[in-house]
Image (spheres, rainbow, N blue to C red):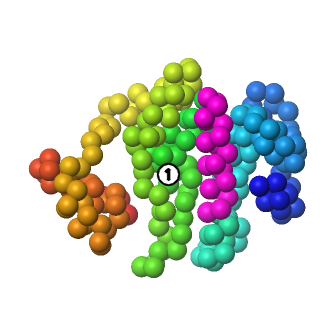
Amino acid sequence: MAKLATTLASVVLLSVTIAATQTPLPLNTLVAQAEKGDAEAQFALGKAYASRPLRGAFPWTAEQLAERTNDLAIAKAWHLKAALQGYADAQYELGRGLIFPEFVWFPIAENPAGGLRHFEPPNAELGVSWLRKAADQGHAAAQEALGRQARWLMLRPGADANLISVLTVDLHQGEAEAIALALEMRADRLLIDE
C-alpha cells in the first residue's frame, strides 16, 4: 500500500486538507497516519484516491480504466476502514456510494456492446445502514439523505430464486431481481437504468 501511495505521489503532487484541523498534509504523512489507524486520515486518503480524475481524452484506454478502477477500490478500502471506526463522514460516503455508485465511485469499464458500464449494482439496504450509522452521530447530510430515502425507498428481496437464476443467464443480477420482484408484485411498470 505504501509503495502504491508513493507511486501516486510521484505522478500527482497531492496534498489533502483534513476537515477538522484544516491543515494541509503531504501525501506521505497522510498515508503514515492512515496506516496507523487514524480514521480522519483514512477518510481523507480515500477522498484523495476517489477524486483523482481519469487522465487523457475519451475514449479511455483499458489501462486508464484499470488505473481508475484500482484508485476507486483503494478509496473504498480506506473509507471502509474509517467507517468501521465510527467516522461519520466515511459512513456517509459509503452509504451514498452503495445506493448511488455512479454518482460517488464512478466504477466504469468498457462495455463489449459499446460505451461504458458500471461495475457494481446499487446495494440500497447496505447503503441505508451506513447512512443510519452516520445519521445517528448527527451527520446532517446523512440525516437529510435518509429523509429523502424514506419517502421512496422500499427494500424487498425477490422471492422467486428460480426465476432470478434463469434471468441472470442473460441479465445482470440486479436487473434479474428487479424483474422477478416486479412480476411478483404485479407491477404495471418497471424502470431499469442501463
Q: In the rendered image, which quarter is residue 45 located in? A: top right
Side (left or right) of 99 relative to 61 = left
Where is residue 59? Give x, y as percent: 59, 76
Where is residue 178? Give x, y as percent: 26, 54
Q: In the rendered image, which quarter is residue 58 located in? A: bottom right
Mark 1, secondary structure of its residue: helix
Residue 148 higher or lower than 186, as above or below: above
Q: Quadrant of the C terminus?
A: bottom left
Where is residue 132? Give x, y as percent: 47, 28
Where is residue 43? Give x, y as percent: 69, 39
Q: Quadrant of the N terminus?
A: bottom right
Q: Main secondary structure of the magenta part?
A: helix
Side (left or right) of 117 relative to 21 = left
- Residue at image point 19% right, 54% down: 160
Q: Dot 1, how many residues are within 10 Å of its Cα: few (below 14), some (14-19), or many (20+)?
A: some
**In the current view of this chain or complex, which residue is farthest to the left?**
186
Nearer the observer, 23 or 155: 155
Is 75 magenta? The answer is yes
Side (left or right) of 34 relative to 194 = right
- Residue at image point 71% right, 56% down: 52
Magenta extent: 69-87
Residue 115 higher or lower than 184, as above or below: below
Could you tell me if residue 41 is visible in this image?
A: no
Could you tell me if residue 20 is visible in this image?
A: yes
Amino acid type of the residue tagged 1 in the rendering: Pro
- Residue at image point 86% right, 38% down: 24
> Which residue is tagged 1?
101
